[in-house]
Image: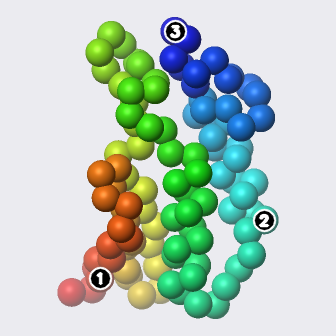
């Protein structure tokens, strides 16, 4: 199917899963680190959003599409889960200790 990765398989910046994984792994490995949690979480989500799969671009079978439903990360020391959803890019936080 042409829509699988929009025909960009194995090209730099492609939309197929492996290309997006390589991009995010490289970017996270080289992104500046910060001691400020808010800055770190915001930067993390901005990086993740750069490789999201939008709705209706990747048809897996007739009429069914793959897309990024949510993104998340967690501060394991504090037990705080941060997440965004496809329809809401606001970063929400859940304290898993409460």
Mark seen at residue 54: none
Quadrant of the image containing the C terminus: bottom left
**Sequence-wise first label, 3 or 1:** 3
**Mark 2 closeness class: few <14, some 14–19, many ≥20 residues within 10 Å:** few
Secondary structure category for the residue under label 1 = strand
Residue at horizontal 73%, vertical 68%? 31
Task: For marks 3 and 2, give the CA distance.
Answer: 34 Å
Residue 51 location (% of width, % of height): 57, 46
User: Which picture quadrant has residue 21?
Assistant: top right
Q: Which of marks 3 and 1 is in front?
A: 3
- The residue under label 3 is 1
- The residue under label 2 is 30
User: Which picture quadrant has residue 43?
Assistant: bottom right
User: Which picture quadrant has residue 18?
Assistant: top right
**Sequence-wise first label, 2 or 1:** 2
Task: For marks 2 and 1, give the CA distance.
Answer: 28 Å
Residue 61 location (% of width, % of height): 36, 13
Residue 7 location (% of width, % of height): 63, 18
Q: In this view, does 61 lie above or below 93?
A: above
- The residue under label 1 is 95
């Amino acid at each position: 199917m042409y829509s699988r990765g929009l025909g960009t398989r194995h090209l730099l910046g492609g939309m197929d899963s492996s290309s997006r994984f390589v991009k995010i792994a490289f970017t996270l490995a080289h992104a500046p680190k910060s001691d400020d949690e808010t800055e770190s979480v915001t930067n993390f989500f901005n990086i993740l959003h750069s490789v999201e799969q939008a709705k209706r671009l990747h048809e897996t079978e007739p009429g069914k599409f793959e897309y990024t439903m949510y993104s998340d990360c967690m501060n394991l020391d504090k037990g705080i889960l941060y997440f965004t959803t496809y329809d809401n890019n606001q970063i929400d936080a859940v304290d898993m200790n409460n």
